[in-house]
Image (cartoon, rainbow, N blue to C red):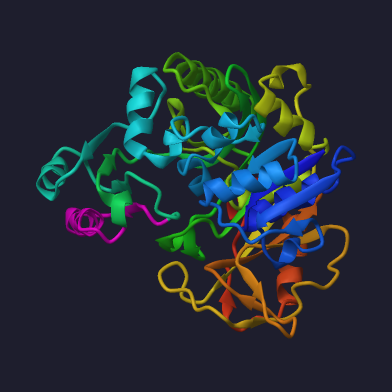
Amino acid sequence: MNILLVGSGGREHALAWKLRQSPLLTRLVIAPGNPGMERLGELRPVKVTDVENLVALAREIAADLVVVGPEASLEAGLADRLAQVGVPCFGASRKAAQLETSKAFAKGFCDRHHIPTAAYGVYESVAEARAALDVFRPPYVIKADGLAAGKGVVISPDKRDALAEIEMMLGGRLGQAGARVVIEEFMEGEEASLFALCDGTHAVLFGGGQDHKRAFDGDLGPNTGGMGSYSPAPVFDPELVEAAQTRIVEPVIAGMAAEGMPYRGVLYAGLMATSQGPKVVEFNARFGDPECQVLMLRLEDDLLPYLLACARGDVSRLPPPRFKAETAICVVLAAKGYPDSPLPGSIIRGAEQDFGPHVQVFHAGTARRPDGQLTAAGGRVLNVCALGADIAEARARAYEAVRRIDWPGGFHRSDIGWRALDREGA
């Protein structure tokens, strides 16, 4: 089979790594890709939002399937355009992707279909939002309505801080993403991510994990796109998973179909495990990043048939995917200054050495100089991932690999997996 993979981050590197292992694969073309994917497929310099040229590329290579990694491609309507020309696509339509691309849409959808989530309000002016702060209690959860590259969610401890964040968002700092804000009730509990592969009618659960959003150790600092992750997440006991499937995942698939926007692709349900059961924190219309990386390390089955079944509308014919009992962990190495002003261009040494069978390093934001040296070209730059019998062994392997990478221009958290480690030590 000929596959076109769209994207250039760590998530897409992990998908390419797993797709390369499929005996069904004939040709893998990646657009635009990154230096870490050079050995896995053919790289083509087409931007992820350049819909017409991506469609042209899919037709050029006679793609049997297009796998869409980033949300920006979905918002640009890539899946819709591919459907028009008859090319199977693993990825949600523009309308269905609103579950991620509009927080206001997602909250309203949950209301209409009785899906448990936090109480909320949607506001388009500072005056309205300021008045709402008298209704909600601190800490205040403030979200930009649109896509903001992981920077559109803030938890404010008091009204003064909350109002400053609201004024920033509505004032245009986040562009169109901040044209509306959502203020939510703060939920007490432990947050984790559950994934499901969907074909518009059916959904098959596809594992889960936990990530670390804050930039610094101890869950301090600004929110980011994710500084690390691990899978499985101990919080996902069988009772919680069953509740999430019946109260959240299945109603989402049924509700989207009923509203005329059948959901195909991967559904990321960010959940809070509360005393009342699981509640929705957010939805993503693509694999999480860096959660995808740990899922790919643990997946035992061939990924390609599942992605193809989602695109063709027959995922229910496949058996539930199998995952290794081992724990996988991902430590993100980010450029200094991330998430606000990451410093580009610093040289990275040692990232492409052989770290042994239990470690994989995925590129998330790298570039290669004419002399072959690897440099930082983004905020989150490398994903150092490892498998182990438990969280302690996986973590030890990942951090040993981190120590072998020479990159003075980067930083990382040193406490990835602390929740799971605490549980195992209890």
Image quarter of residue 23? top right
Residue 338's spot in the image, x, y percent? 47, 70
From this viewpoint, is residue 265 visible? no
Residue 224 visible to an observer of this rendering: yes
341 over 232 or under it: above or below: below
In the picture, which quadrant includes the N terminus? Answer: top right
Is residue 229 rendered magenta in the image? no
Residue at image point 58% right, 30% down? 83
Where residue 105 sits in the image (x, y, percent)? 35, 32
Rendering coords of residue 292 (x, y %): 65, 47
Taking depth in this image into account, of 50 and 301 the one nearest to the observer is 50
Is 159 part of what is drawn in magenta?
Answer: yes
Instruction: Say which of 115 and 82 sits in front.
Output: 82
Residue for point 23% across, 59% down: 168
Q: Quadrant of residue 353?
A: bottom right
**Occupied quadrant, residue 90:** top right
Tell me what residue is drawn at x 75 percent, y 40 percent.
Answer: 62
Q: Nearer the viewer, residue 58 or 120?
A: 58
412 on left or right of 140: right
Q: Position of residue 108 (x, y in %)?
A: 32, 27
Q: Relative to the observer, which residue lies in front, 13 or 278? A: 13
Q: Is residue 84 above or below residue 363?
A: above
Instruction: State the extent of the magenta-drawn residues as a range.
Output: 151-174
Marker count (numbered): 0
Q: Identify which residue is drawn at 82% across, 49% down.
A: 20
Indicate whether 34 appears above or below 177.
Answer: below
